[in-house]
Image (cartoon, rainbow, N blue to C red):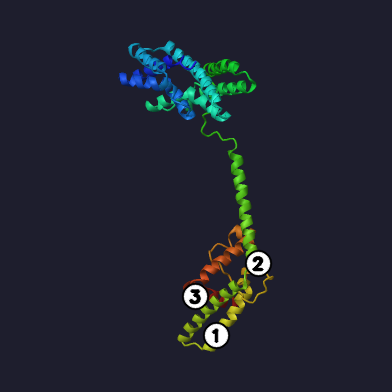
Amino acid sequence: MDVSGVLLMGVIGGTLARHRGYDIVGFFFIAMLSALGGGMLRDVLINQGTVAAMSQPEYLILAFTGALIARFTYFKGRAWEVMQSHGDAMISALWAATGASKAIYYDLPVLPTIMMGVFTATGGGMIRDVVTGREPSVFGGNQPTVVPAVVCAVILIVGDATGFLALGMALGPLASYALFLVGYYSTWKLNQDKDFAPVNATVNATVSQVATIARKAENRSRAVARELEPKALRAWRHRQMEKALERRVEAEVVKGKNRAEVRSAADEFLDEFTSQFPAIDANIDAEQKPNDHERLLDGVGMDFDGTSYNDETAQSDPEKAAAAHADMLDIILADDALTDELIERLVARYKEKDN
């Protein structure tokens, strides 16, 4: 069974070399790869002794004979195409059986056994197509090759497991060839639609749900973190505000204003500000927290990003908005220049509010 198809595959490979315009060297190489490539690939992967094509001279002799036949005889036309496709399918069926049986002989697991059947049946064609610069036909096309080889290998595995390996050696190639005939005459082939993804919508919906849950969990954890915020952080914010107000007091004194009056106004502003924005008050009770987003910012008008009062997210998720504003405030307070600008803006708002 292993050598029966070598001559025909040599002829098929040599005919392809003629179509590609190769010289006699090309005929020999393409014929050898077509006829022996699958078996050599199988034997190399099994790694048990010398490759059969090298240890038994009839393999090379038959392959090169097929190349010579193709060199001196021009096979073409519809009859040749039918004979080539059907002969290739029958040889692939036989080789799938021999590849699987050799894997069984060396006690390979089930999946490698199936792979050996497939590689033996299709490996020569794949190597031939790659060498000649074509896309391997096993990757798609109207002639099924891999599925029939898999079916053949599975039948041999079942036959070996049930004690009927000889029967499997007969039924496997027949079933493989029958599948080829079904595919060839009914134009059956595996789906090649690159956009085919029946679970795509489900996966995308699941990812979206997971992302939403993750965002909610993050917002909740941030809100909890704010509630448990250490007083040291609030004290730091308070000190940064005090330092900024002290710089403003000094600047106002340099302009000629009374120090006592300027400091009194600054203290009054700081008391008012911390009562409206508790996260900056170092003395606030850790259990006390604002009821909603409006209480947190009402009366001060701190709109750091310019969109908080128009953002639907801020209205629907006050905890998230509060956490975002607190983070932004920390960034501003870490920079003296930004803190001074913040103080100027807030004082201006404070004066307008009083007026």
Instruction: Give the amino acid at mark 3.
Output: Asp
Write down the residue under mark 1: 263
Q: Position of residue 1 (x, y in %)?
A: 50, 15
Q: Is residue 352 left or right of residue 2?
A: right
Toward which corner of the image does residue 81 lie, by quadrant? top left
Q: Are the two marked residues, 3 and 1, in contact with CB atoms closer than 8 angstroms? A: no
Quadrant location, the C terminus: bottom right
Nearer to us in this view, 181 or 59: 59
| In this rendering, the label closer to the viewer, 2 or 1 | 2
The reply to whether residue 140 is visible in this rendering is: no
Q: Is residue 300 left or right of residue 16?
A: right
C-alpha distance separating marks 2 and 1: 32 Å
Q: Residue at x 56, y 35 (%)?
A: 197
The reply to whether residue 204 is visible in this rendering is: yes
Toward which corner of the image does residue 74 lie, by quadrant? top left
C-alpha distance separating marks 3 and 2: 27 Å
Write down the residue under mark 2: 227
Nearer to us in this view, 347 or 9: 9
Q: Residue at x 52, y 88 (%)?
A: 259
Nearer to us in this view, 158 or 102: 102
Instruction: Please tell me whether mark 2 sits on a helix, a strand or a loop.
Output: helix
The mark that comes first in sequence, 3 or 1, is 1
Instruction: Please tell me whether mark 1 sits on a helix, a strand or a loop.
Output: helix
Crowd tier of the residue under label 2, counting other residues whose Cα lies within 10 Å: few below 14, some 14–19, many 20 or above: some
Write down the residue under mark 3: 340
